[in-house]
Image (tube, rainbow, N blue to C red):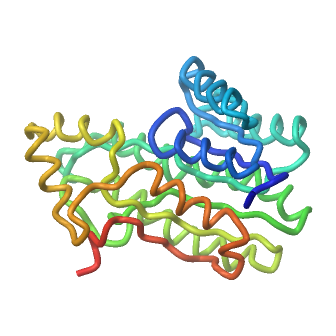
Amino acid sequence: MKLDGKVALITGGNSGIGSATAALLAKEGATVVLTGRNQARGDQIAQAITEAGGRAIFLRADVRVADDCRQVIEQTLERFGRIDVLFNNAGVYHPRTVPECTEQEWDETIDSSLKGAFLMSKYALPSMIERGSGSIIHTSSGWGIQGGDHAAAYCAAKGGLVVMAKAMAIDHGPDGIRVNCVCPGDVDTPMLPDDAGRRGMAWDDYVAGASDRPLGRIGTTEEIARAVLFLASDDSSFITGEALVVDGGGIAG
């Protein structure tokens, strides 16, 4: 198993990419610590992983709050003694242009994705530096590399994650720590129907537009999870500071 004996901490683990990645990393031998704001949902996911033969716990945390992030790191280290993989996956999305976007929506988007990744990394890095190893992965987006419509705050947050990963890779490569981004395209998660509704689009029309890419479909959470596993494992041992695009060719042109 690619992560046998490792400890992986996943934010935004309550659904979608986070829960699929938790299940896969546990299957590959990792002890998984999930975080999110929904205690009941998080406990259900951790229990399902445990019943499938894996090892997982849920710790409630809001990544926008420094004390929550610090406590999750401390509790993980107290219980398991190490953090080998940090997957900064939490985030929200508001389909807004700059004039449409409220200050609250802007702050929520930036804080949940960019600030959250900063805070979790800030508190996890000292233990990784002490051990001389670690892999940190941020969930960015294809729209973190090129812009998208009605997504100004989201693009700002996801673009910031790409460049922050590069800066962190430079700073912490000498410490034995790799830092990368995974950049999904449209993926079959609860975010898509929510976005379709907020844009006032029929679901069939929305999916047809999202599938307009060389592979002709939207992605699955399991496909993104496999990319995260690659970046978390020694299969990518000479890769750092990169943004791995997993979008069916959506931004290839």
Classify 180 as above or below 126: below
Residue 191 location in percent, x, y? 32, 40
Q: Residue at x 65, y 33 (%)?
A: 49
Q: Residue at x 26, y 69 (%)?
A: 250
Q: Residue at x 54, y 76 (%)?
A: 242
Residue 117 location in percent, x, y? 59, 52
User: Could you tell me which quadrant the N terminus lies in?
Assistant: bottom right
Q: Quadrant of residue 92?
A: top left
Relative depth, front residue between 102 and 20 = 20
User: Could you tell me which quadrant the C terminus lies in?
Assistant: bottom left
Residue at the limit of the structure toward the top, as seen here: 40
Classify 59 as above or below 248: above
Q: How many marks?
A: 0
Relative depth, front residue between 7 and 76 = 7
Classify 64 as above or below 59: below
Residue 199 location in percent, x, y? 14, 41
| Left or right placement of residue 61 versus residue 160 in this view | right
Relative depth, front residue between 112 and 29 = 29
Residue 114 location in percent, x, y? 51, 54
Q: Residue at x 61, y 66 (%)?
A: 230
